[in-house]
Amino acid sequence: MKKCLVLMCTYNGEKYLREQIDSILAQKGVEVALKVADDCSTDGTVSILEEYRTAHPNVDYTVNQENKRFTYNFIDLFFSADGTDYDYFAFSDQDDFWQEEKLLSAIEQIERMPQNERGTLYCSNLIVTDGNLNPRGMQEGKRILKANKKTFPYENIATGCTCVFDAKFFRHCKKYYPQNIRLHDYWFFLIAAYTAQYVYDLDGHILYRQHGGNQIGSNQKLFTKRNVKGFRKYQGAQSSLARELLNGYGEEMSEKDKKRFLRVRDYKKRFSSWLCLLFGARCHTLKKTFALKVKVLTHKL
């Protein structure tokens, strides 16, 4: 039986945490271990984690000495993990619910991929639900399959809680610690898309719970009060990700791919790069392409 280490980050997640952990421990056909990093919760989250660690030898957790926030809680948890005893790894949020075949389905799809010395990352669609796990529909339609290496510098198709990857990819990502990124799932997906390989599953095996406490959620509407307010404070994720990807993995990327990311990295200081992005960059939908153009115009890419 394959062994999988699930990496979960928590922060004030007491409301839904038990359901999520139970769904992880109930995975079929996979031997699961769970490692959790709590980001200085002030509710009963740590007590729940202690309860599960006492009852389950395959569950462990640590509590951060200071708040790292979402992205670097995951990044540091990943780099602290000892992958010696595991065949696969997965990321988990604190408030979803995994269908019992979630991990096994991902592993089977990874193993059907061609062999790659740098490994394989799996990501998938999600079943969006309300706070009580009542389904609202799939997060993505078939159009998501139109996203490709030309659009990935501007859009991420890998939601972190869907990501599963093999030991080769785990080791490949350990080669470089990113200094300044804002989205951990986007970071790992870019490494896979441009230096290793990935597989996207249009089916969903996670009930993706949307509620008032989500740090990042499934918001399909563009002009909401929350989005407009957030955009004013938005500093941009792509340009910093491009810089880090080139620093860490530029030597392993093709020349064409490096040029794509150089434009993103340098668009604020090179007028030619700015023009190229403004008139040439595209995402897989018109809505996302429009949002991309606004980010370029306002230097928030």
Image (spheres, helix red, strand yellow):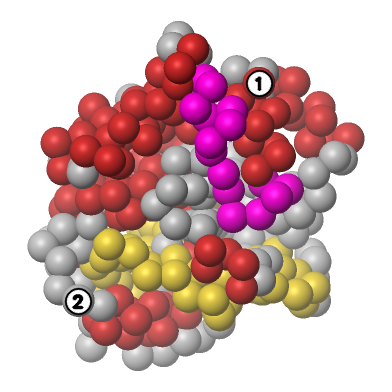
Q: Amino acid at mark 2?
A: Pro
Q: Residue furthest top?
A: 269
Closer to the camera in the image, 220 or 160: 220
Task: State the residue position of label 2.
Answer: 114
In the image, 268 versus 49, the foreground residue is 268
Q: Quadrant of the N terminus?
A: bottom left
What is the x, y in percent for residue 90?
38, 64
What range is drawn magenta here?
274-288
Rendered location of residue 72, percent (x, y) = 43, 35
* Crowd tier of the residue under label 1, counting other residues whose Cα lies within 10 Å: few below 14, some 14–19, many 20 or above: some
Query: Mark 1 is on which residue type?
Result: Leu
Compare marks 1 and 2 and give the one earlier in the sequence. Answer: 2
Name the disc covering residue 18, or none.
none
Q: Secondary structure at mark 1?
A: helix
Residue 60 horizontal side relative to residue 52, left or right: left
Of the 4 image quadrants, the one containing the C terminus is: top right
